[in-house]
Image (spheres, helix red, strand yellow):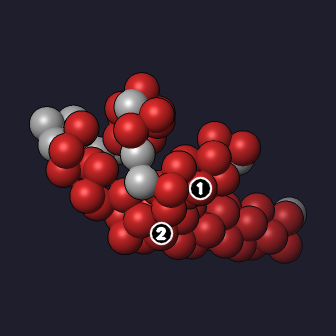
Amino acid sequence: MTRAILIAALLCLSGAAHAQDLTAEQRSACMGDYEKFCKGVAPGGGRIIACLSKSSDKLAPECKKVLTAAEKK
């Protein structure tokens, strides 16, 4: 039982680390677009990704690439 709980905890932590990597990538690729189109949007819950997606036709190519990857997850 303890082994199962430990494995589950490790899987959750690895998923959280992956999500943080994606967030750092989004920040660096989409910071300019965030400043232009979504500056008043509070982070969390996918709100920034949703906001940027609404302006997808105006985004920088690097940011579009990151959003496409985020939407596939």
Circle 1 sits in a helix, a strand or a loop, which is it? helix
Quote the CA–CA distance across marks 2 and 1: 10 Å
Q: Does residue 70 show up?
A: no
Residue 40 lies in quadrant: top left
Answer few, some or many: residues within 10 Å of disc 2's Cα (few below 14, many 20 plus, some between 14 and 19). Answer: some
Answer few, some or many: residues within 10 Å of disc 1's Cα (few below 14, many 20 plus, some between 14 and 19). Answer: some
Question: Which residue shows up at 18% across the image and 50% down it?
Answer: 35
Residue under label 2: 25
Left or right of residue 14, residue 58 in this image: left
Q: Nearer the viewer, residue 8 or 13?
A: 13
Question: Which residue shows up at 41% across the image and 65% down it?
Answer: 29
The percent coordinates of residue 49 (x first, y second) are: 44, 40
What residue type is disc 2 on? Glu
Q: Nearer the viewer, residue 69 or 9?
A: 69
Question: Which residue shows up at 42% across the image and 54% down it?
Answer: 60
Left or right of residue 40, residue 71 in this image: right
